[in-house]
Image: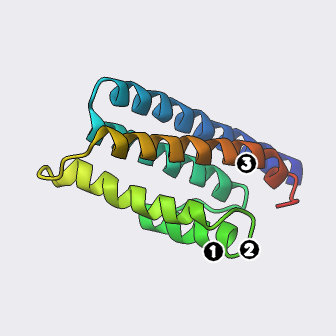
Amino acid sequence: MEGSRDRNKSLNGKDYLKSARQKLRSAKVLLDTGNYGDSISRSYYAFLDAATTGLITKDLLPKSHTGAIDLFSLHFIKTNLVETKYIKWFKRIKKDREDADYKHKREFTKEDAEETYYEAEEFVRMIEELFSELLKGRG
């Protein structure tokens, strides 16, 4: 039964990683076409899906965006599995995503969108590299 549960974690985690990669591709297209707020939003969701991948390996599935941040902080930052910069980026990108989606008065620049995209890309890559180790229980 344990092997089956680990297999399910792997499959679910792979689904979330695939989704994170798709969202990064969308963010890049939006960035390249000057849709900076929408690019930031897609970058955020790539971040969220990648974080969820990590949480799945700990048998956790967040019920909200804030829950994902809190659980990721508790299980990955406070345990020193990943660098503190990632949670800072996650929180900032979440706020920027909310502004991009709901506060139409805020203008985002190309530099804002590029920074967000590259941070999300780094985070997704880090989670991908960590994923198999987390499944093995070393993380």
Position in image of residue 31 (x %, y %): 36, 31
Disc 2, SS:
loop
Which residue is the site of mark 2?
Answer: 79
Q: Residues within 10 Å of mark 1 (few under 14, many from 20)?
A: few
Cα–Cα span, label 3 and label 1: 19 Å
- In this view, the residue in front, 58 or 29, is 29
- In this view, the residue in front, 94 or 113, is 113
- Is 15 positioned to the left or the right of 28 in the image? right
Kind of residue at disc 2: Thr
Q: Quadrant of residue 65?
A: bottom left
Disc 1, SS:
helix
Q: Residues within 10 Å of mark 2 (few under 14, many from 20)?
A: few
- In this view, the residue in front, 107 or 6, is 107
Asked whether residue 63 is in view, the answer is no
Disc number lying in front (3 or 2): 2
Which residue is the site of mark 3?
Answer: 9
| Sequence order check, earlier mark of 3 and 2 | 3
Kind of residue at disc 3: Lys
Residue at horizontal 62%, vertical 39%?
A: 17
- Relative to residue 35, is residue 127 depicted above or below? below
- Given contact means CB atoms under 8 Å apart, are the residues at marks 1 and 2 in contact? yes
Kind of residue at disc 1: Leu
Which residue is the site of mark 1?
Answer: 74
Residue at horizontal 75%, vertical 64%?
A: 81
